Amino acid sequence: ADSPSWLKPLPPRRCGVGVAPAMEVLRALCQSDRPVTEVLQGLDVVCTLLANVADSPSEDRFRSVRKANARIVPLLGHEEEGILRGAGFEDGEDGRLVCLGGRAAAPEPVPPSQLLELLGAVRVATTALREKLPEEAASGQPLLGGPVCRDPHVSRALDCALLDFVGQRSIEAAEADKRRRRADEAEALASPERWREALGGAGGGFLCDGGPVEAWLAADAAHRHLAHELVVLQEAAVRWYGPGAKRHCEDWRARLLAQGGAGPDAGAGGVQPGAAIASELQALREAIFEFPEREGAAPALFRKAGHTASDGADAGGECSVVTVSPAKREGQHSELVPLE
């Protein structure tokens, strides 16, 4: 005789551990012929199980459930079981599903943050499906002739909701990564041993010339943070505005370092490095982040640099219309003819 369905393991293609395999299972619902009401009932159980594990990770009673449980049996062999296995549930003793996800000793541990992410995805899918139910079925009661998951309006809503969720999570992950990088940079700049490497990585290696500017930077972490902020903005200006910005930044850097024997407190224009750096930082902020004089025009600060370098040619490639007065030619006067 065949074994009961709840003893049969899920096909291997649905047994991947982690958020990505579970998301694939969720998106597979878009092609399913199962009634939306049935899927919603199953996803509600999945949400409960995942929420219990995420909220109380040290409670073993939330990590084990009998496959013969009346609420679990309908999930087995369907997408809901694949989601649970993605969260770290696996076959245990005595016909149970046991969640090892989130435990360091697990063969394939699922970090708590990923459990929460997966729980969020299931909740998004549940909301998208529930919104497509007729009012009489919104309570989760079976409805004859109700929508199935592969119906175009249901499938499209579910897929869009999941894609939006993934996109938002990607944005949040990128922002978190940016915050971590900034924290690492701040820590490195504050370190007497690592600040040169941090400045060099941002494009500020020219400041570490063994001269007065480097001595000024070594004296205080606040000096290094100020210089780092300027270097980052200069590098961005070169990427955004090209040759004109590059010439401006190179000219300023040359002036800053051209101190000779002026002493450790001298900088660009004969002022302290801190004053010169702060002044240039403010000038760049105003040039880049304020509205240009004309739409699409590069900041005047960079156009001036381009003009000087090209002996009067506009580095931005812009043209001006010049009105020329009539001139005498070969002894004849040219006449102004009014336009009709």
Image: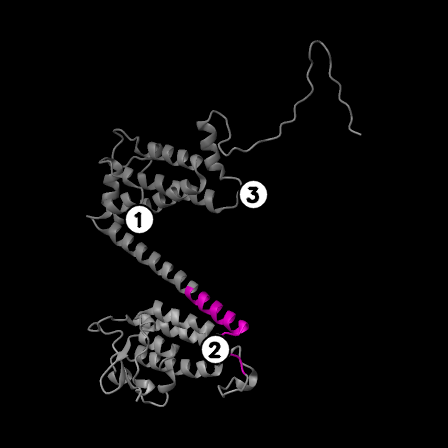
Q: Which of marks 2 and 3 is nearer the N terminus?
A: 2
Secondary structure found at label 1: helix
Q: Which amino acid does label 1 sit on?
A: His
Image side of residue 142 versus residue 171, left or right: right
Image side of residue 319 versus residue 64, left or right: right
- The residue at the point 45 percent across, 65 percent down is 163
In three-dimensional space, the C-alpha distance between marks 1 and 2, rounded to whole angstroms, equals 59 Å
Q: Residue furthest top?
A: 331
Q: Which amino acid does label 3 sit on?
A: Glu
Q: Residue 210 at what x, y percent from top left?
A: 22, 36
User: Depth check: 120 or 162 in front?
Assistant: 162
Determine which of the numbered discs, if any, sits on residue 33 in the image: 2
- The residue at the point 31 percent across, 58 percent down is 180
- The residue at the point 25 percent across, 76 percent down is 100
* Residue 253: quadrant of the picture: top left
User: Depth check: 19 or 114 in front?
Assistant: 19
Q: Residue 152 at what x, y percent from top left?
A: 54, 71
Residue occupied by mark 3: 295
Determine whether 120 is above or below 167 in the image.
below
Q: Residue 295 at what x, y percent from top left?
A: 56, 43
Secondary structure found at label 2: loop
* Residue 242: quadrant of the picture: top left
